[in-house]
Image (tube, helix red, strand yellow):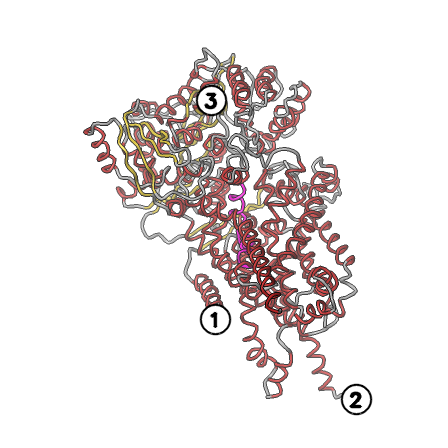
Amino acid sequence: MSEKIKKPFKLSRLIRKTIFYLFIVTLAVVIILPVFFLVSLSFLSTREAYLYPLPLLPSLKARYSLTYGERGYLLSVYDDFNKEYQTVLDTNDFEKMSVYMHSQIGTPFSIPEIEEVIKDLESGPEDTVYFSARKDLLYNYDTFFKVTREAVPALLRSLQIAGMTILISLSIGGLAGYAFARYIFAGRDALKFSVLFVRMFPGVAIALPMVIILANMGFYDRPIGLSLVYSVGSISLTIWITASIFIGIPESLEEAAQVFGATKVQSFLRVTLPLALPGLAAAAMYAFLGAWNETVSAIILTQFNPTFSVVVYQTLLGSVGQVNLAAAGGLVMALPSVFFTFFIRKYIQQMWGGVTI
Amino acid sequence: MKKFSIVLLIVLVGAALLSACQPQTVVETVVVEKEGKTVVETVEVEKEVNKTLVFSSRLFSPPREQEFFINEIIKPFEEEHGVTVNFQIIDDQTLLDRAEVQQTTNHITTDIVVAHNSRMPEWIDAGWVEDLTDLVASWDDRTFSTAFSQDTDKDGHQYFLPVGADVYLLLANNKALPYLPDGVDLDAITWDQYADWAVAIAEGEGEGKVCITGIPAKSWIYMFGGTGLSYGAGFPDANSEGAMEAWKVWEKIGKANGFVPSVLNIDSCVDPMMREESWLTVFHNARAGQVYSSNETAFTLAPAPSGPNGIGSIAGVSGYAIMKGAPNYDLAVAFLEYLTRPDIQVKLAKGTGGFIPPVEEAINYLGDEAIDEVINKAVLVLNNGVVSGVPAGNYQDWGAVKKCFDDVFADTILPGLDVTQERLDTAQACVDDLLK
Amino acid sequence: MTAASPAKRFRDLGSKAVPYLLILPVVVYYFLFWLRPVLKTLIDSFRTAAGGFTFQNYIMVFTDPNFMPALRNTAIIVVFSVSLEFIAALFLALLINRKFFGSSLFLFVAMIPMALPAVAVGAMWLTGLTAHGWMNSLLYYLNIIAESHKIYWLTGSEWKLLALIIVVDAWQVIPSVMIILLAGLQNIPEETIEAGYVFGGDYLTVLRKITVPLLGPTIQTAVILRLISAIQIWLIIVLLVGFSRMPVLVERIVYYHEEVPGLDISFQMASGYTIIVSLIVSTAALLYLRASGAFGSKKEAAR
C-alpha cells in the first residue's frame, strides 16, 4: 500500500522540481540577457553591430563576392539574415579595400590577397568571384587598447586607487566597526547614525569643493586624492560590514586567549583577526567595486591622469558609429568586478548578517 | 577558495603600494586664482629620454580618427626623425586652461596645439602662440585657404595653420531616393524640396525618417542655423523674417510626422543613419563621411539644401599652432611642415572621414573615389555657400543657447504645432538673455 | 564596590576610552574629507556671486520651472523603485535561501548586474532600447513583433519613460538589496522556520508570521540604504535621455555644474540644489527610521 502512494508522489515531486528549475533558469536568463547582448556586441564587427535585426552571435568568417563596378571593383558581403550578398564598396584602391575589410567587417585581408582575388576575377570565365575571410574576433578589444593610448596606464592607476581605497577604508573603518561590535558606550547610537548621515550628501556635490581642498594638499589629479574621496563612501559600508563580521566571532574566544596571558591587542591579532580575515577580504572587494566603477567624481577630480573608468567613458562618448568598441571597453572594465563578485557571494552572511543601522 | 581570495587581495594591495612607491613623473600642482574662479592645474615634469614632441589636439577625437592619425600620419614622421610624438586629445577649454598655467609659470611642456577657430582669437590675444608668418612664406608648394583668415591671422600675421574644415552636407540612404520629388536635382536641392521629400517618405513608409539631434545641447542649433542662413537669417537667430521662413520648412516636416519617432533620444545622427532607423539628414561633413564610408553603395551624398540666399551652412576649422616658448620648436616646425603638405592633408582628410583640407593645392590630389566626392561637395559648400562660424564666446554658456533652439523643436516643431512669432520671440529672448 | 583603588579607576577610565579611540580616526577622516566640502557648499549656498549673504539662491531654486517636475519625478521614482525592488529582492533572496542544487551559481548570476560599471550599463541599454536595437531584434527573432512594427521604447508619454527608467534601474540595483536580505535570511535558525511548519503554518503564513518579523532589522538596513541612494538617482537617466528632458533633483546639480557651467547663476543653483537634496534625503531617512521603529529597538539591537 505504501508503495502505491509513493510512486505518484515521486512523480509529482519530479514535476514540481522540473517546473522549479525551469523557473530558475528563466529567471537567470532574464537577468543575464542584457549582459549577453553586451558581450555579443563587443565581438561584432562594425557592420554587424548596425544591422537590424542584430545578429545574436558574431560570425566567425565573412563571405564576399567581387565583381566589376562603376568606380573599379564592387565588393559585396553575404548577409546571413537576408540570405543574399549586399554591396558595400566600389573602389579601385586596394589599400582602401583592405582597410575596409578589416575595420568594418572585421576580417584581416592583405593587399596581395586582394590582388590574388582580382587575378581570379580577371582570368576566370565568370564576372563574379566568391571568397571568404576569417574574422578577427578580438579586433574591437585590440582597437580599444590601441586607440586609447591612455588605457594601460589608466588601468594601473585605477588598480592603485582601488588598492589604496581598500587600505584606507579597511583600516579606519575596521577599527570603528570593531568598536561598534564589541563595546556599548555613550553616544554609540548617535555616532552610528552619523555614519549613515554621511551617505545622504550627494557624492557629486562633494567632488566639486574637493577639487580645491585636494589641490591645496597637492593631491589633485593624483590617485591618492581619488582614493581619499572614494573612502568617504566606502568607510561607512566598511564600518557596517566589519561590525557585522566581528559580532559573528564570539567574544569568548578573545577572553579565553586573555586567560592564557595574552594582552587584548595580542588576542585580537592572534584570535579574532585570522577568523575575520575571509570576511574582511570580501569587505575589501566591496570597496574595490565602488572605487573601480566610479566615473563621475573621477571626471571631476582628474585632469591628465584619468582613471580607467574615465577613459572608457570618453571612448563611449567619442565612438559614435562604433558602439561595439564602447562595449568592448565597458567589458574590459567589468571583468575584475564580476570576478570579485564571484568571491563575495560566499561571505554575504558574514558581511551583512549582523548589520543594524 | 578562502586562501585564494586572501592571496589575491594581498597581491592587489601590494601592487598598489608598490606602484605608489615607484618613481613616477613628478607632478606639480599649481592653484591659480583668476577672476574669482580658481583654476587648478597640474604640470607634468618628465625626464627627457629621447625627444618627445607634445601634440595636444581638439581635433580627431573619435577613436577611428585617432587610430588613423597615430598609425598613418604620426608613425611615418616618428620613424623618419627618430622622435616620439605624444598625441593627446584635449578639448578647447582645457587646452586654454593648460596653456595659461604653462605660460604663467613659465614652464612650457606642450609644443603644438590644435584649436577651433572660434577660440583662436583668445590664443592670439593672449600671446601664447608663435607667429608663423615667415614660416608660411617660406613654403612655396602650398597656399592656405583664406576662408578663415579672420580667425587664423591678426594684423597681417598668421598664427594658426588651418586643418580639417567642416560644413554641413546632405546624406540620404538610397532607400529614400524613390521618394525624391520629380525633377529635383539632388546636387541643387532646395529646403522646400527637402521638406517635400521628407513628407513623401513619411507618407510612403508610415513613419518619419528625418534625423536631427533631439537630445538637448547637441547639434540642432547648427542644423537649423544652416536653414536660417539659406533664408537670410543670422546666427544664432530665432525670430527674424528669414528665420521664420526657415522654421516653416521644419514646421512642414513636423506636421507630417516626418522625424524619426525616436528623435528626442538622438544625440548624434551617425548611429541612426548607420542602423537605417533614419534615412535623411543634413549634418557635419566628417560625420556624414563616416556614415558614407561605412557603406558607400548604400548612401548618397549631396551639398546641403539651398534657400533664396544660397546654401547656408555653419562652418568651422581647426588650426595648428606652436606654443610660445615650445621646448622643441625646431621639431614642431618640421612636424607642421610635414602635416600641412597638400598630399598629407588630403591623406588626412580621406582617412578621417571627409574633413576639408584647407589648402588650394589639395584639389590636385583628389581622385574619383567616393571619399573624394565627399570632400569635393564640402569644398563646394565652403566656397559658394553662405557660411557662418559659431560665436560661442559672446555668450555666458553656449550649451544654454543651444537649448533655446532645442526647446522650440521639442515643444512646437515635433508636436506639429504652428510656429508663431510669439514663440520665436521667446526663443530669441532666451538667447539674448545669455549674452555676456 | 566601596572604595575602588585609584589605579583601578584609571584602568576603568582607560577601557572606557577604548571605543572612542577606535572611532577617532573615522571622525577625523570625516571631518577632513566630508565635513569640509559639505560646509563649503553650505556656505556657498548662502552666498551671492559677489560674496555677500543672501537667500536668493534658494528662492531661485524654488522658482526654477524645473524644480517641481524634478521633485515630482524623483518622488515617483523613489516610491516605485524602493517598493518594487524590495519585493523583487525579497523574492530572489527567499528563492536562493532554499539552497537548491545550483543556488550558489544562481546567486552569482543574480549578482552580476551590480558589478557592472555605469559605462557598460549605458552602452547596454542604449543599444537595446533604440528602435533597431537588440530588444526589438530579440522580439523579432521570437516572432513577437513583425519587422515593420518596432517598439519605440524611449518615446511617448513621460509616464512610460518613468516606468522604463524604474525598470532599467531596478535591474542593476536589485542585487545589492537582495544580498542584504539574503544575509538576514541565512541568520534565521532553520529550527525556527521548521517550528512554524510543525504548528501547521503554510508557506505564506510562516513567511508573514515568522520570517519577515525576524528579518525586521535587516529589512530596515536594506530599505534605508536603498532609499538614500534612490533619491540620488540621475546617471542612468542622463545616459538614456540626456539632460533636462526628465529632470530629477541630483541631475539638476550635475546639469548646472557640468552642462552649463558658464551661466552666471550656475554656481548658485548647483549649491542651492545640493543643500535642498541633502535635506530631503535626510528627512526621508529620519522619517523612515522613525516609522519603522528603528529608534525604539535600538537598545536591543545593540546587544
Residues at marks 1 and 2, CA–CA distance in whole angstroms: 52 Å
In magenta stretch: residue A319: no
Residue closest to the far front: A1
Query: Which residue position is annotated with label 2?
Result: C3
Q: Residue at x 36, y 44 (%)?
A: A60
Residue highlighted by disc 3: B176
Give the CA distance from mark 1 to mark 3: 63 Å
Residue A176 shows up from this direction: no
Q: Amino acid at mark 2?
A: Ala
Find residue B157 and report its image quarter. top left
Judging depth in this view, the residue of A350 and B374 nearest the camera is A350
| Image location of residue A114, percent across then percent down | 25, 35
Q: Are marks 1 and 2 in contact (CB under 8 Å)?
A: no
Based on the picture, tell me whether residue C124 belongs to the magenta stretch. Answer: yes
What number is the disc on residue C13?
Answer: none
Q: Left or right of B330: which side holds C278? A: right
Mark 1 or mark 3: whose residue is earlier in sequence: 1
Q: Magenta segment range?
A: C107-127
User: From the image, which quarter does the C terminus of chain C lie in?
Assistant: bottom right
